[in-house]
Image: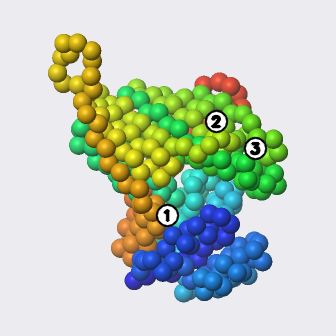
Amino acid sequence: MTARAAIIGLGRWGRSLVNAVHDKTDAIRFTAAYTRTRANAEDFCREKSIPLLARFEDALADPNIDAVVLATPHSQHAEQVMAAAAAGKHIHAEKPLTLDRPSAEAAVAAARRAGIVLAVGFNRRFHPSVVAIRKRLAGGQLGQVMSMVATHTTSTGQFIAADNWRAQPDEAPGGAITAVGVHSIDHMIEFGGEVADVLCTTRRYIPGPPADDTTNVMLRFKNGATGLLFCSVATATTLSFTLFGTKGLAEFSKPNLGHLRFVPVSTVAPTGPVTAPPDEIIETPTFDMLHAELVEFGRCIEAKRPYPVAIDQVLHGMAVFDAVIRSGKSGNIEAVDGSGTI
């Protein structure tokens, strides 16, 4: 069965999602679209043979639509998820799920009551580099997680108009966290467990857009691990994530996550200068993460199974998100509230 989906929101990211699967898979197909800026999307939808709907509610009322994929402003997600769940539609929502934990809990509760698939777009979890770290951590090759250090930057802030929704402080609280940082926080939660508290600073470097564009976060985990995150939309593009364990380190890098490096700890006592064992390098330069996440969404709908991004981890991520925003405003270490399940 091919899942029939409506794309909701056709800005840069919505179009990227459509392009990722259009004529490339039988797991999911976009059969309808809705956007607030219809005139800007007409040529794209005509090229893809995707009918444009007049209202979001039209997608919910159509029995020939199985799912909605939300590429809309973050502040709209909670209401849209609850409406789609009430209509019995499966839902793929871009990250962050909402803009605070209470609204995320309400959205998740609605999806659970409806018994539908709720997927959150942490597409990097599907990349082979991330999968390899997950497997090696579970297999014990990395030992106990000690610390994680992440950098994620882009230059997109240079091109976003000051009146664009992505540049507004109420849509991008915490600086660059909403645009890019939540991905690294998601990895840290999956690999390191629940976060106890955070310390955050934010700043704006690019003149024009009102929202801060750069964020630094220090994290302490309940199991004793630590984390450091630098993210920005105001500089050149780069990406790296390093996990330091008691038996070795694992690191992926490059904007496409395509370079993976494992280094085990030394097992022979040094007789001279300390040298590290040879690196293990794996290159995956062409993996399409958007394609992977949407194909998996379609397969979960067909198999009637949960999406493999754990909702409890998503909710804890929203609690961390809340604490990061509070710390950025207060300048103080802020405890992470709302741990556990709902």
Give amino acid for label 1.
Leu
How far from the left and from the top, in percent, is residue 228?
Answer: 51, 31
Q: Which residue is drawn at 17% across and 21% down?
A: 268
Q: What secondary structure is marked by label 2?
A: strand
Q: In which quarter of the image is residue 145?
A: top left
Q: Are marks 1 and 3 in contact (CB under 8 Å)?
A: no
Per the model, the C-alpha gap separating discs 3 and 2 is 11 Å
**Residue 306, placed above or below residue 249:** below
Query: In the shown orientation, is residue 114 left or right of residue 330?
Result: left
Direction front: furthest residue: 272
Direction left: furthest residue: 268
Per the model, the C-alpha gap separating discs 1 and 3 is 27 Å
Per the model, the C-alpha gap separating discs 2 and 1 is 25 Å
How far from the left and from the top, in percent, is residue 234?
Answer: 68, 42
Q: Residue at x 27, y 26 (%)?
A: 276
Give amino acid for label 3.
Ala
Q: Residue under label 1, please give it.
A: 290
Q: Residue under label 3, please give it.
A: 211
**Residue 265, placed above or below residue 153:** above
Q: Residue under label 2, please give it.
A: 215
Give amino acid for label 2.
Thr
Q: Nearer the viewer, residue 301 or 32?
A: 32
Q: Nearer the viewer, residue 296 or 205?
A: 205
Mark 2 or mark 1: whose residue is earlier in sequence? 2
